[in-house]
Structures are given as structure tokens and as C-alpha cells.
Amino acid sequence: MSLHLLTSFLLLIFTLLVFFLITRTRSSKSSSAPADVILPKSYPIVGSFFSFLANRNQLLQWVTSILQNVPSATFSLHRLGGQVTILTANPANVQHILKTNFYNYPKGAGIRTTLFDFLGHGIFNVDGEQWKFQRQISSHEFNTKSLRKFVETVVETELSERLFPLLESAAANKQVLDFQDVLQRFAFDNICRIAFGYDPEYLLPSFPEAKFARAFDEGVKISSERFRATLPIVWKIKRLLNIGSEKHLKLAASEVREFSKNIIEEKKKNPGESMDLLSRFLSSGQYDDDFVTDIVISFTLAGRDTTSAALTWFFLLISKHPEAEKEILNEIKEKSNTPVYEDIKDMVYTHASLCESMRFYPPVPVDPKFADKDDVLPDGTVVKKGMRVAYHPYAMGRMEKLWGKDWSEFKPERWLKREEDETWSFVGRDSYTYPVFQAGPRICLGKEMAFLQMKRVVSGVLKRFKVVPVIEEGVEPEFVAHLTAKMKGGFPIRIEERNESK
């Protein structure tokens, strides 16, 4: 039965590919731009399958070009078998999806199924009462007292005892570091310590090779590829037969779950004196260890991958804009030698620079939902029950309508205004124009924690070191959209000690 199904499927693929090659040959006029830059052609049954296939290696850029050229910044992409995905970069639509009609746009069964093998019932993969419960318990971890503790103890220790000595050694030995890897290790240690009361010691000079970290990256990558699959039935068949990438995902998920369960067992044996995130869930007594394991995995994803992604692209952009780096250094000098909680909160130019960096490179580039019922978006787009509806932070950061004709320029000043005393004050954008941290009921609980951590890293690193990318001139690092953003191949850098007298 399985062999017959696989043979029929391969025959279908072969037929479609032949048709695609013929169509592509006939319609090809230029190889200098992505296929169907403005509006992809749609055919009966197969929809825009061929355009999707032609742009499968540049989907973010392809969709962005479409949304930039559609008046309403919303487009309905017809996929194979009559499936429709509505893509939008329209703030009014985003507000409708994330707030006004929030309950009509849950994660939905399609997304839960796609991510279940890795995220299970964790907060980023559930709706309804499960989501409400996890969010309620988690919210206690983000009060002012916890944020201050996070910055003044966890982050400070990780900086002074691990990150700074590592960068000093790299500078002395003229060593090339993969800064993306370093920042992931830094963030992983931080989230484990503050949320689970566990120190994995991942950022050590020896760069320990953690099986968990490798498995986690593998799980995130393969789970993300399921979303981008030209034909989703492919990964479902591979999963059924336990072959290829789906076999690797199964092994990776097993490794991640084993690691997470070990953290839970250790917490049960040594609960500690203070309540952290893991302690709160365990003491609630409402769910079993498998459910708590899912929670550990979700918060590891949030704490490790998002902040490290944001910082990776930030340091790249700052290296290209010395005037912005100079402003940040001036702001650092105005603060005390060892910035504390209040000082970091007041670093408005640094804050603006991080916002501007994430405008270009949001840690979560696309966020899909599923329509629970028929609906009509504010711009008139008709949504049918069961349709996938995705708002697109990556494209929204590149919309001239939202950011002006200078949208392609890195300008932290667009987030600031000068006061009468010549100081800067921050001028934020609404969370529907800039949904980098989501918005509405699902807005990111860790937003302030993320900014505090990032600003402390930026102030600490730039005060003492200069980050110099080791990238060929004219070569742009590739932005890869997994569940969170990555820099393809890592971020190679050299570190130079900064002369603080300058």
C-alpha cells in the first residue's frame, strides 16, 4: 500500500516538473530577477505551484516583492490542490488578525500538526485554555523584580565570567569567531539559568559540543522546512516511512526531550530557594512531565534563538554604520562603568538601533494563523474558513508606505526625536506596524527582558571591543528563515580591543 502510494506520488511529481520546465522555458524573459516578481501566475488545480517552486530558495524576498507591489499589501497565494494562503503586510489587517478578531485566528490544527513533533503542546503551538494557562503562569516571571535579577545577576555573570574573557582571548590571538554561535551559547546559558535554574555551561572557552544544541538546531530547521515544502505530502510520507529528514527530526526531537526531562528531574531533586519559571509549572500540579517538557522546549526556543538572532544582525549592521556605532559609544560613556538596570533602560539610542536592526531582520520573519470562520479583512480581502493567514514582519519592515522613501537606509534616528535639552527621546511605532514582538493578546511576554539583555550585551561588548566581520567585500550574508532567523553559515568576526581613551 505504502509502496503503491509512493510510486503514484513520484509519477505526479515527474509530470508536474516536466510541465514546470516547459512553462518556465516558454515564459522566461530574464534571469536577472526572481520569477514573477509582481504577481505569480495561477493555474487550475496547481495554483501558483510553479512560481512557488521557482522561488523556493528565496521565498521571503519573493513574497516581499509581491507585497511591495500590491496596493493593499495583501496577496492570496494559491497553492497546489486549491489551498490558499493569505499574506499581508497591511497594519490594519495585522491589527484585525492579532487583536480585533483574535479568536478567529488561532494557530490552528495545520500549524499544530506541522510543529507538534518538535514543540508538542508548548505555548507557541497551542490555543485556547492550554495557551491561557501557560501564559498566566509565565507572566509572573516577567515582573520588575525578576527583570532586575536577570540583568544584574544572570546576564552580568555570563558577561564577566564567560563572554568577555572569550572575546579578550580572541582579540589577543587574532582568532576568527562565529559570533552567531557565541551569541546562541550566551543566550542559551541565560535562559536556562533564569527560567529553569540550570547552568548548561555552554559558553566556555573550550566551546563544548552539546548534543542537545545540535539536536535543537536540527529540530528547528527541519520543522521550519515543513512549512516551506512545495508539496507538504512529501514530508508526511517521509514521516510515515521514517526516512530522510523526518527520521533526523525524530532523532533530534528525542534528544531534545531527553535533555529537557533531565532538567525537570534535576529541578525536582533540587528545587532551590526561589521560584523560577520551571518551578511555577511544576508546582501548579495541573499537568504531567511530558507537558512541562514541551514548555521547556518552547521557552528554550524563545530565549535562545530570538535574542541571539537579533544581536547577530545588529552587530553586522553596526559594523557597516560607524556613525551609529559612535552614537552608541557616546551613550555608553554617559552611563556608569558598570551599567545597572536603570542605566540600561535609559539607553534610548541603543534601543532605537536595535529596533531599526529588527525592522530589517526580525527574529520571527513570518507568523501564520488559520481562519476558524469565514471573515473579511479591513482591506476587503475575503477569508474562508480553514485558510492560512500570515502576517509578514520581514516584508513590513521594507514597505515604503510604512517607513518612507528612505526605508532601505539604516537610520536609528527614525525612532527618536530631539528634546529641548538636546537629549534623545524614543518614539515607538504601534505594534501592528511593527509586529516584531507580535501584538494583541499574544504579544511577547519577554519583550522587555529581551531588550534589557540585548542592550546590556551591546553596551558591554562595544565599550571594550570592536566587532569586525570577516566577510568578502560586496558579499551579503544570507538571511535564513527557520522558526527564527539565522545567518546562513554563521557570522565570522575578528575582535579588536577598543582603546577606551578615544
Image (cartoon, helix red, strand yellow):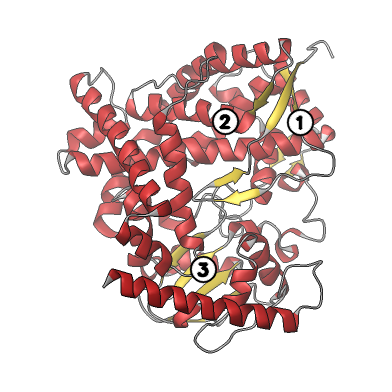
Q: Amino acid at mark 2?
A: Asp
Disc with the residue nearer the chain's start (3 vs 1):
3
Give the number of the disc on residue 470. 1
Give the x, y percent position of residue 130: 25, 53
- Judged left or right of residue 92, residue 502 is right
Q: Amino acid at mark 3?
A: Thr
Q: How many marks?
A: 3
Sort mark 2 into few (<14), some (14-19) or many (20+) by Cα contacts within 10 Å.
some
Q: Amino acid at mark 1?
A: Val
Q: Secondary structure at mark 2?
A: helix
Give the number of the disc on residue 230. 3
Sort mark 1 into few (<14), some (14-19) or many (20+) by Cα contacts within 10 Å.
few
Residue behind mark 2 = 181
Q: Secondary structure at mark 3?
A: loop
- Whether residue 352 is visible here, answered yes or no, is yes
Disc with the residue nearer the chain's start (2 vs 3):
2
CA distance separating discs 3 and 1 = 35 Å
Give the x, y percent position of residue 474: 84, 44
- Judged left or right of residue 224, residue 468 is right
Give the x, y percent position of residue 248: 39, 47
In terms of image quadrants, where is residue 337? top right
